[in-house]
Image (tube, rainbow, N blue to C red):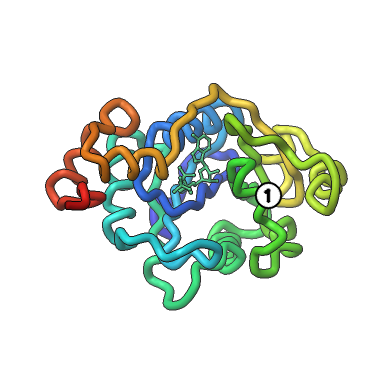
Amino acid sequence: MSQLPSSRGAVAVFGGTFNPIHFGHLRSALELLESLELAQLRFMPASEPPHREAPEVSAEHRAAMVERAITGEPRFVCDQRELNRAGPSYTIDSLAELRAELGERRGLCLVMGCDALLGLPSWHRWGELLGLAHLVILARPGWALPAEGALAALLRDHAGSSEDLSQKPAGAVVTQTLRPQDISATNIRALLQLGFSARYLLPESVLAYIAERGLYAKQE
Ligand code: ATP
């Protein structure tokens, strides 16, 4: 596997459309990495997200923005495997590949915000996810964890500790409350389409990439 972590500790995968990547993603990822003592956090842009409309900005552009945003942080990696695979980007397939590359014993975590968690029951083979990885849920402003139903049962039945993430390969659910960052890509796209600045919501290097290529441009 490209860019395997050298240190011990779990490897985390943070999937998303990253359309574009912003400080909500980046700051949450860094706090998670440090608080859970992860060896590495892999941003994994979805090529064709199965659960939402295809983003108007290509997967190559979205991955290039992730690459720019994480430059200089060696514990972050941009995992482009979903760009190289035809068809919908199923997380279960990516986790199975990563599991094969990392071996049976290494802790592997799938990170998602609690908005993404609410959609989990519609994911392809979602019942198999915990057999391959742990689940790390990020609290996000404006979103609450499910209190009843299948997801509430999943959170309850598999509740684990941060130690489980490195000591066991998969199967624990851990919820993390980090510094809240009320930033969304939807809001950034809306600002840019209206001709406003999105400065200080995302890295300057990403803003420069957007400006150079006229992405999310104001509609005339
Ligand atoms: P959009 O507004 O287009 O839906 P987004 O800002 O939610 O985009 P995504 O790429 O869809 O970003 O999100 C990838 C992952 O990052 C998801 O699990 C999402 O919950 C999480 N996430 C996004 N923004 C934040 C934030 N501000 N704080 C914590 N988690 C976040």
Q: Is residue 174 left or right of residue 196?
A: right
User: Percent position (x, y) of residue 75?
Assistant: 42, 37
Report the residue marked by disc 1. Answer: 118
Please tell me which residue is depicted at 38% across the width and 66% down the height of the picture.
83
Q: Is residue 61 left or right of residue 98?
A: left
- Decide which of 90, 7 is in the foreground and name it: 90
Please tell me which residue is depicted at 45% across the width and 60% down the height of the picture.
46
Picture layout, residue 61 above or below residue 141: below
Dot 1 surroundings within 10 Å: few (below 14), some, or many (20 or more)? some
User: Percent position (x, y) of residue 81?
Assistant: 42, 64
| Image quadrant where one finds the N terminus | bottom left
Picture layout, residue 142 above or below residue 137: above
Residue type at tag 1: Leu
- Decide which of 184, 164 is in the foreground and name it: 184
Which image quarter: residue 55? bottom left
User: Percent position (x, y) of residue 185?
Assistant: 40, 43
Please tell me which residue is depicted at 50% across the width and 31% down the height of the picture.
28
Q: Is residue 169 left or right of residue 184?
A: right
Picture layout, residue 193 above or below residue 94: above
Which image quarter: residue 158? top right
- Decide which of 189, 83 is in the foreground and name it: 189
User: Percent position (x, y) of residue 37?
Assistant: 57, 30
In the picture as drawn, the residue positioned furthest to the top comes out as 179
- Decide which of 136, 188 is in the foreground and name it: 188
